[in-house]
Amino acid sequence: MTETVRRIQPDIIVNVAAYTAVDKAESEHNIAQLLNVTSVEAVAKEAQKLGAWLIHYSTDYVFDGRGQHPWAETDTPAPLNLYGDTKLAGEQAVQMYCNKYLIFRTSWVYAAQGSNFTKTMLLLRIGKVRGYCSYQ
């Protein structure tokens, strides 16, 4: 990956790659660490060498969810699980190794495959219509 970045020499690098299996991260710590921290650090270092902007996608899992107001980027992170820990460490690597960056903390990004917010809401709606959900 770093060879490709060096060859292309982009002005902007968008990092959307991540290990996102929240529950499995607890038992697959090494792969979560590799994808969410180690690789992010490598990308941040390459962006810095090129003088490129790094746009990095993180998660709201860097917070504990106990707030009463919408989170702000200045709020103190407090991850509750290993997934959140690795995503926070990735953010810190970006901040440490790259001067020009944007970090977006998202929740359940939409995708064609896997679980996401839209699919879950549709499944809940279908279940409710068919009488499968216990809530009204």
Image: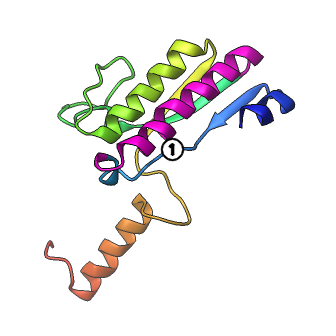
- Say if 56 sits above or below 48 in the image: below
Say which of 87 and 136 sits in front.
Answer: 87
- State which quarter of the image contains the N terminus: top right
The x, y position of residue 93, in whole percent, is 50, 21
Boundaries of the magenta span: 26-52
Residue for badge 1: 18
Report the predominant secondary structure element of the magenta stretch: helix
Res 51 visible: no
Q: Nearer the viewer, residue 15 or 67?
A: 15
Left or right: 85 in relation to 67: right
SS for dot 1: loop
Reply above or below: 70 against 30.
above
Q: Is residue 48 above or below residue 58?
A: above
- Residue 81 location, quadrant: top left
Q: Residue at x 57, y 14 (%)?
A: 97
Q: Residue 38: where, in percent of width, then height? A: 51, 31
The answer to whether residue 31 is magenta is yes
Query: For the point 34% across and 41% down, which residue is it?
Result: 83
Q: Which quadrant is home to the C terminus? A: bottom left
Residue 104 % position (x, y):
50, 32
User: Which class describes the residues within 10 Å of circle 1: few (<14), some (14-19), or many (20+)?
Assistant: many
Residue in the image at 63% along x and 28% along y: 43
Whether 11 is among the magenta residues is: no
Residue 34 picture location, percent across and down: 49, 38
Instruction: Identify the residue at the far right of this view.
Output: 7
Q: Nearer the viewer, residue 42 or 54?
A: 42
Name the residue type under label 1: Ala
Residue depicted at 41% across the width and 34% down the height: 87
Q: Is residue 15 left or right of residue 4?
A: left
**8 displayed left or right of 26:** right
Which colour style is shown?
rainbow
